[in-house]
């Protein structure tokens, strides 16, 4: 018979009969919780995560710091560049003004065949100032051509930003140094400009003032030329800056002076001959009687219908404008009879007409008779009593005219 397996009291009721079942654990005892990972492994993970975050934070801080540092350097660089560009713009304008000034002064220095010569030291001072100005202008142009260092593109990463910031700071320093150099050069340009202006104005002033002596040395020049010289001299003396107007003023002065010489030569040529010395003596005599009045003289065989057979003729034209001027015409016979009293008296009568430009309000100039009586009265008031003073031709003037004429000098 078949043997049955032993009965197991702990076997579940539903366990099948026969066979055998292995236990899940070969050790005895109660059942336990599932196994856990070692605690030290979880701590390592946390520390790793914290360390990674710290690295990321450090990188972020470094990135931000590098970016801010670059921005600060960029702002400082921009200020330095703006200053340099501003100084460059200012210097460019001042250098252009200096060059224009030097060009104008150079034209004055280069003048040739000058009738009025300024003192040698004045011309030398202007020539030296022009040379210095041209040198300063050239140096300024060279400095203006210097490029202002630019910033370039801003890098992205901190390891690039740090190096770029250092270079940007160097460029900032270069821009600041350039601004300082531009400012210093501007001071040199202004100094050169002042020197040219000062020496140029001094030259024109001295030349203008020399016109007085120049006029006196060319006493026989025609009135129009003398007036032009005076006007040109006044313009030269009034010059305060050296520019195209100053160049024109100086050229006009020299041209007027040349015209004075030319008209004097023409007048002297007309008066040449046997009577020349007497004519010049008479002209000097007339000018001495009426200082301050521009007198011009013309000579001819017949003047105002007289000149032959011992007669003498004279005729005067005058202008009331400023300056008072007159043209006196005399017959050759006046010079032939010089220095007789009658010649002096006739010349004094004509000067009486000429000097009336200084005493317009002292007599009635509305009639020819009054005009002639005035000239006669003036000759008498000067002590020229020969009848050629006008008495013979126009009669004796009233004492009131003589008294009034005595106040006209």
Image (spheres, rainbow, N blue to C red):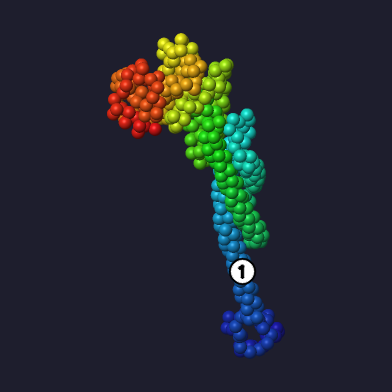
Q: Nearer the viewer, residue 387 or 212?
A: 387
Q: Residue at x 38, y 20 (%)?
A: 387
Q: Nearer the viewer, residue 89 or 6?
A: 89
Return the x and y of residue 189 as percentages of the image width and height. 60, 47
The image shows residue 302, relative to residue 128, as above or below, that is above
- Residue 263 seen from this side: no
- Which element carries disc 1, helix, strand or loop? helix
The image shows residue 98, relative to residue 168, as above or below, that is above
Number of on-image labels: 1
The image shows residue 155, relative to residue 295, as above or below, that is below
Return the x and y of residue 273 as percentages of the image width and height. 57, 16
Q: In the displayed structure, does residue 319 sit left or right of residue 80?
A: left
Q: Residue at x 39, y 32 (%)?
A: 409
Which residue is disc 1 drawn over? Answer: 58
Return the x and y of residue 375 as percentages of the image width and height. 36, 24
Q: Nearer the viewer, residue 275 or 137?
A: 275
Return the x and y of residue 346 as percentages of the image width and height. 42, 21
Q: Residue at x 69, y 85 (%)?
A: 26
Q: Nearer the viewer, residue 150 or 333?
A: 333
Quadrant assignment, res 277: top right
Q: In the displayed structure, does residue 132 sit left or right of residue 409?
A: right
Q: Residue at x 51, y 30 (%)?
A: 229
Q: Alpha-carbon neighbours of circle 1 within 10 Å: few (<14), some, or many (≥20)? A: few
- Residue 399 seen from this side: yes
Task: Indicate the quadrant containing the N terminus: top left, top right, bottom left or bottom right.
Answer: bottom right
């Amino acid at each position: 018979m078949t043997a049955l397996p032993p009965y197991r009291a702990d076997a579940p009721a539903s366990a099948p009969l026969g066979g055998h079942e292995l236990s899940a654990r070969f050790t005895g005892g109660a059942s336990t919780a599932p196994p856990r990972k070692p605690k030290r492994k979880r701590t390592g993970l946390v520390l790793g995560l914290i360390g990674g975050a710290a690295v990321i934070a450090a990188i972020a801080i470094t990135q931000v710091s590098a970016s801010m540092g670059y921005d600060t350097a960029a702002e400082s660089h921009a200020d330095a560049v703006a200053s340099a560009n501003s100084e460059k713009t200012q210097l460019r304008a001042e250098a252009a003004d200096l060059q224009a000034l030097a060009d104008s002064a150079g034209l004055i220095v280069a003048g040739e065949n000058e009738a009025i010569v300024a003192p040698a030291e004045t011309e030398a001072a202007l020539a030296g100032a022009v040379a210095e100005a041209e040198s300063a202008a050239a140096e300024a142009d060279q400095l203006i051509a210097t490029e202002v260092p630019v910033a370039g593109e801003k890098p992205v990463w901190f390891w690039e930003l740090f190096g770029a910031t250092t270079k940007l700071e160097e460029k900032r320093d270069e821009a600041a140094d350039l601004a300082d150099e531009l400012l210093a050069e501007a001071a040199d340009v202004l100094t050169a400009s002042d020197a040219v202006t000062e020496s140029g104005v001094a030259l024109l002033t001295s030349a203008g003032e020399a016109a007085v002596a120049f006029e006196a040395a060319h006493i026989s020049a025609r009135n129009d030329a003398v007036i032009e010289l005076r006007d040109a001299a006044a313009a030269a003396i009034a010059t305060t800056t050296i520019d195209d107007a100053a160049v024109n003023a100086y050229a006009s002065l020299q041209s007027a002076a040349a015209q004075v010489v030319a008209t004097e030569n023409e007048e002297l040529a007309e008066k040449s001959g046997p009577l020349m010395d007497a004519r010049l003596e008479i002209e000097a005599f007339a000018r001495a009687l009426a200082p301050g009045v521009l007198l011009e003289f013309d000579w001819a065989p017949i003047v105002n219908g007289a000149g032959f057979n011992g007669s003498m003729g004279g005729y005067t034209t005058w202008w009331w404008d400023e300056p008072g001027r007159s043209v006196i015409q005399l017959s050759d016979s006046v010079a032939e009879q010089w220095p007789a009293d009658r010649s002096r008296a006739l010349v004094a009568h004509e000067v009486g007409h000429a000097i009336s430009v200084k005493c317009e309000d002292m007599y009635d100039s509305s009639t020819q008779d009054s005009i002639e009586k005035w000239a006669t009265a003036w000759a008498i008031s000067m002590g020229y009593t020969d009848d050629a003073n006008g008495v013979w031709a126009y009669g004796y003037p009233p004492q009131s005219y003589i008294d009034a004429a005595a106040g006209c000098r």
